[in-house]
Image: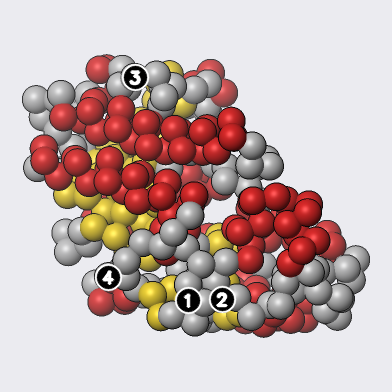
Amino acid sequence: MRVLVTGATGLIGRQICEELRQEGHETVILSRRPSGVKTGPGISAYAWDPERGNPPAEAWDGVDAVIHLAGEPVAGARWTNDQKRRIRDSRVTGTKNLVDGMKELAIRPRVFVSASAVGFYGDRGEEDLDERSSPGNGFLSDVCREWEDEALKAEQAGIRVSLVRIGVVLSREGGALEKMLLPFKLGLGGQLGDGRQWFPWIHIDDIVGIFRHALVNENVRGPINGVAPGIVSNAEFSRQFAGALNRSVFFPVPAFALRMMMGEMAIVVLSSQKVAPKVALDTGYDFKFPQLSEALKSFQF
């Protein structure tokens, strides 16, 4: 299979590309800086700016499937108006241009697996959420809804579309866990706000597994939640993470302090999303790390 991947240099993209390589698939990588992509047998790279137009025609040659991960990091910088524009346009405009490129092809990919996020649901307290749940309110919910709407337009071209709503990815190689590691090792880590908000986490191996599952399983259409079944509260996550490091949980970080430090972006860590991976389970995905204790143990801190 020949798979086109955007966002291939990110946390999830790197591991997806490596697994595709190990399985003997060819990979076509779209990147703003293709010179920085390690190419070789079965791996090629082309320049593409997601906000400036369709991918180059030559990149599509023989492509059977597309995995779309590109997007400005949500927690990469304080949410100024300009940063919010970058977050939105990198996803919404980028996805539109990618889908427009597919529509122009005489021979189109069979499947399009696009990233989305659990931010789609907004701050929902104790409400049980699965793929049938409505979108929430607020900036992230609006971005996710527009993002998914653009991806679903590929169905008009006869392409199967799957939308992976990604939770908090746990990995030693980057992401949230790497940022939390030092303060917790120093004994300074603690719950965020009151800690009662639900924390929809997933192990890096399982989010990659769900993307692969969506790629090859014809029954996976539309949204699929990329979260583990064993969801916990933020307070419980903090307790288990500190325990895995043989540390104690320190004082909580008050919500007002988070809002002062992070501004509007604090909603990312204070929102409660009790999300279940119903579609993944119903379509036969077998989680490697369904419970947090198993996931943390795998990192061998």
Query: Label 1 to label 4, Cα distance in Å?
Result: 13 Å
Q: Which residue is mark 3?
A: 53
Res. 169 image quadrant: bottom right
Nearer the observer, 54 or 5:
54
Q: Secondary structure at mark 3?
A: loop
Q: Is residue 58 above or below residue 125?
A: above
Which amino acid, by three-letter code, is at mark 2? Trp
Badge 1 or badge 2: first in the primary sequence: 2
Q: Secondary structure at mark 1?
A: strand
Q: Position of residue 94 (x, y in %)?
A: 38, 31
Q: Position of residue 202 (x, y in %)?
A: 52, 67
Q: Quick check: marks 1 and 4 in contact, CB under 8 Å?
A: no
Q: Is residue 126 above or below residue 214?
A: below
Res. 226 image quadrant: bottom left
Which amino acid, by three-letter code, is at mark 4? Arg
Res. 128 image quadrant: bottom left
Query: Label 4 to label 3, Cα distance in Å?
Result: 32 Å
Query: Label 1 to label 2, Cα distance in Å?
Result: 5 Å
Badge 3 or badge 1: first in the primary sequence: 3
Which amino acid, by three-letter code, is at mark 1? Lys
Q: Is residue 22 visible?
A: no
Q: Secondary structure at mark 2?
A: strand
Mark sitting on residue 198: 2
Q: Which residue is mark 1?
A: 274
